[in-house]
Image: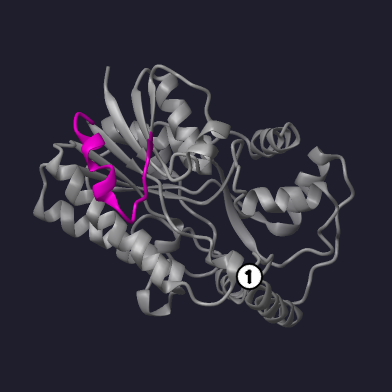
């Protein structure tokens, strides 16, 4: 039985990856920050070891990497959009420095494969064009989160060049949805807002929506069908926010808003939200970073799935199934 190590195991992608690995017969060592959250996410299983630790302190759990064939690195800091303001310190500490320390520990432990969850954030292209794995984003024109993901992937690539004995693969997901979203992520929060009729209007924007379970499968398949050093886009389906909200409303059986907030007004709302977050310390629904992202990425969410289909031999499940399963899971909590 092969033993593997998963970081960020209680996250949306991480927990679905853990379940998929167990279903396929792997023994999983799952890194979690909160054992309480892990107990909510997983039932006890003889193929699952819960390892409590933090990616910012790899030394606290590195001994558990011994005997692992593969490390699946899903842990990342991304909640800057919930808090507003600048969070470069956390982004750098977790997404960049944490990744580097994990790589060093994995090499020391004799890990053979390292599957790094990058992001479509490292790619860019002209509006309306099909973006593939070769379309690198200019780091100088990136927000802090995008910059952290670009540098994080570069860190893995530089490490792999120096230490080719460890095979590294790069998975680039779109906006992930699916069951098991305890956070919740921005996807789960949007679903809850629609379900509870708390969405007053629709924000403008286009996105690429993918099921976290499809991303999990791609991560596993990449280790035996993929080529070390290659990127694999797992972005999913291009969709407008108004259509996404309408589909969520359909499965939630609730009426959804039809009016779209003009971009100038959206900036004003974001400023007020930032002030609210600053004075209350509470998460916010809309940050300036989110609005800038919507404006800059509009119609730049058409991504190629050629490598995903031809090399990994996979297909995306219907978005209808993803949304239905997401809402069902949220309703059953």
Q: Position of residue 40 (x, y in %)?
A: 58, 33
The residue wearing badge 1 is 281
Taking the image as drawn, is residue 135 in sight? no
Q: Quick check: 181 left or right of 154?
A: right
Its colouring scheme is: one colour
Q: Position of residue 198 (x, y in %)?
A: 83, 57
204 and 167: which is toward the camera? 167
Q: Is residue 219 above or below residue 174?
A: above
Q: Is residue 234 magenta?
A: no
**Residue at 60 percent of width and 39 percent of height:** 178
Magenta range is 51-68
Q: Quick check: 322 left or right of 2?
A: right
Q: Quick check: 99 left or right of 87?
A: left
**Residue at 83 percent of width and 49 percent of height:** 196
Q: Position of residue 332 (x, y in %)?
A: 73, 31
Q: Quadrant of residue 312?
A: top left
**Residue at 61 percent of width and 74 percent of height:** 295
Q: Quadrant of the N terminus?
A: top left
Q: Is residue 260 above or below residue 233?
A: below
Q: Is residue 111 above or below residue 156?
A: above
Q: Quadrant of the C terminus?
A: top right
**Residue at 52 percent of width and 28 percent of height:** 42
Q: Is residue 56 magenta?
A: yes
- Element under disc 1: loop
183 and 169: which is toward the camera? 183
Taking the image as drawn, is residue 293 in sight? yes
Q: Is residue 15 above or below residue 75?
A: above
95 and 229: which is toward the camera? 95
Q: Quick check: 124 left or right of 228?
A: right
């Amino acid at each position: 039985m092969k033993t593997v190590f998963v970081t960020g195991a209680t996250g949306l992608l991480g927990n679905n990856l853990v379940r998929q690995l167990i279903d396929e017969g792997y023994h999983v060592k799952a890194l979690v920050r909160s054992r309480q959250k892990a107990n909510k996410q997983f039932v006890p299983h003889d193929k699952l070891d819960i390892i409590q630790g933090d990616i910012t302190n790899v030394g606290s759990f590195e001994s558990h990497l011994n005997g692992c064939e593969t490390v699946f690195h899903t842990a990342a800091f991304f909640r800057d959009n919930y808090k507003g303001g600048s969070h470069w310190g956390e982004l750098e500490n977790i997404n960049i420095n944490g990744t580097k320390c994990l790589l060093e520990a994995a090499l020391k432990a004799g890990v053979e494969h390292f599957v790094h969850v990058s992001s479509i954030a490292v790619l860019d292209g002209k509006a309306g064009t099909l973006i593939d794995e070769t379309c690198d984003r200019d780091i100088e024109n990136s927000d802090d989160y995008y910059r952290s993901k670009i540098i994080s992937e570069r860190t893995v690539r530089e490490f792999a060049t120096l230490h080719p004995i460890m095979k590294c693969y790069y998975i680039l997901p779109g906006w992930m949805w699916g069951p098991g979203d305890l956070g919740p992520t921005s996807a789960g929060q949007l679903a809850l807002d629609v379900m509870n009729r708390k969405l007053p209007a629709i924000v403008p924007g286009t996105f690429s929506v993918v099921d976290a379970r499809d991303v999990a499968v791609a991560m596993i398949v990449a280790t035996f069908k993929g080529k070390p050093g290659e990127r694999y886009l797992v972005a999913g389906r291009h969709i407008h926010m108004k259509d996404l909200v309408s589909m969520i409303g359909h499965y939630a059986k609730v009426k959804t808003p039809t009016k779209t907030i003009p971009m100038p007004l959206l900036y004003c709302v974001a400023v007020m939200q930032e002030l609210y977050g600053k004075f209350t310390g509470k998460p916010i629904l809309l940050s300036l970073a989110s609005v800038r992202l919507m404006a800059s990425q509009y119609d730049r969410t058409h991504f190629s799935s050629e490598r995903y289909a031809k090399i990994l031999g996979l297909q995306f499940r219907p978005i209808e199934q993803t949304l239905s399963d997401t809402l069902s899971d949220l309703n059953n909590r």
